[in-house]
Image (cartoon, rainbow, N blue to C red):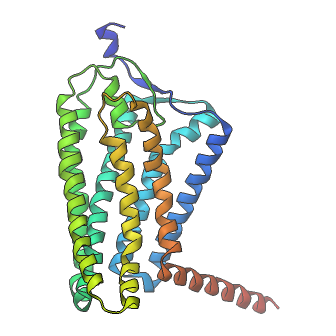
Amino acid sequence: MDHRNMSTITYFFITGIPDEPFVFLLVLLIYLTTLGGNLTIFLLICLDHHLHTPMYFFLANLSILDITSSTITVHKIFSSFISGDNIVSVVQCRMQFIVFMLVSCFELLLLTVMSYDRYVAICKPLHYNLIMNLKLCALLTLFSWSCAFLEGLPLFMGIFQVTCFKSNEMDHFFCDIMPFLKLTCSDISFLQLYIYIVGGLVIGFITFILIFISYIFIIGTILSIRSSSGRRKAFYTCSSHLTVVICFYFSLTFQYMRPSTSKNLGYNKYFSLLNGAVVPILNPLIYSLKNKDVKAAVARKMRFVLSTNIQAHEKKM
């Protein structure tokens, strides 16, 4: 293939999609559970006034992010298995990983904001309602979205300057940034530097440090509580968030912070599947199984639906 033909590629073949029915059913089950769990969390928070607090406001945003990232990453597996279509245009490919990177960046910032919320709740409980008011929550969310957009803008502009490709076969199950750059024959030194410096060190490392600092103060406060029941209750309020942070950072680090020259680069798609499909399913499970407020909200809604059905039945009688 000569250079002229390289530059005329308009679509990619997504070749890293397994065609085994077992894999399809497993991914479908994971996705449906992710979709159902996160939608349930989101609707509960919207409908139950007991959950109209800063923590659950941020959790509602996190649920939307999980649905978005999961849909972006696994939808091609479904369409390829059902219709046999494993083709995606170059423009669609660019937009796919731009949205995925934007969502991932916002999730990092949102988890950082949630760590600050837990810090205020445990370290400054008497001032919690005064500090974490609705205005501050909205500003923090808007700030996170703005930072994610500004971080992704140079990447967005740089990606659309990439027009030369060595091949149109992408060994992945969706258009991720690393396999995309691996196929290009354009100069991508800026993009690689930007991803590792801005995406990895600035956004990833700074958010990690801020979360780490928050939990240093949180742990210090918990250890200063004299009663064991008080320490357990304080730790309980932040354990769900801490679990989500560990899972998300673990998958994201192995997905993007491995060198592109590694012989194991093909394993990145499995870490992408972990980050895009498995981690989003953990969030509703962690917050529903470990959180008594969410379980109480579910019980209230079930009682309400049951009583409504009984009343409707009695009217018919």
Rendering coords of residue 92 (x, y %): 39, 35
Residue 133 in sight in this render: no
Rendering coords of residue 137 (x, y %): 26, 74
Q: Residue at x 38, y 56 (%)?
A: 248
Number of numbered discs: 0
> Which residue occupies the foreground of this view, 219 or 35?
219
Furthest residue toward top: 2
Specify the quadrant of the image occupied by residue 8: top left
Which part of the image, by quadrant, shows the N terminus? top left
Give the vertical position of 306 relative to 11 (above or below): below
Left or right, 136 with respect to 19, comes to left
Specify the quadrant of the image occupied by residue 119: bottom left
Rendering coords of residue 128 (x, y %): 25, 86
Give the vertical position of 89 relative to 282 (above or below): above
Rendering coords of residue 158 (x, y %): 21, 34
Residue 232 in sight in this render: yes
Furthest residue toward right: 317
> Which residue occupies the foreground of this view, 101 or 317?
101
> Which residue occupies the foreground of this view, 117 or 266?
266
Specify the quadrant of the image occupied by residue 240: bottom left
Give the vertical position of 159 relative to 49 (above or below): above
Q: Residue at x 21, y 44 (%)?
A: 153
Give the vertical position of 251 relative to 86 (above or below): below
Q: Residue at x 26, y 60 (%)?
A: 109
Which part of the image, by quadrant, shows the C terminus? bottom right
Q: Residue at x 54, y 65 (%)?
A: 37
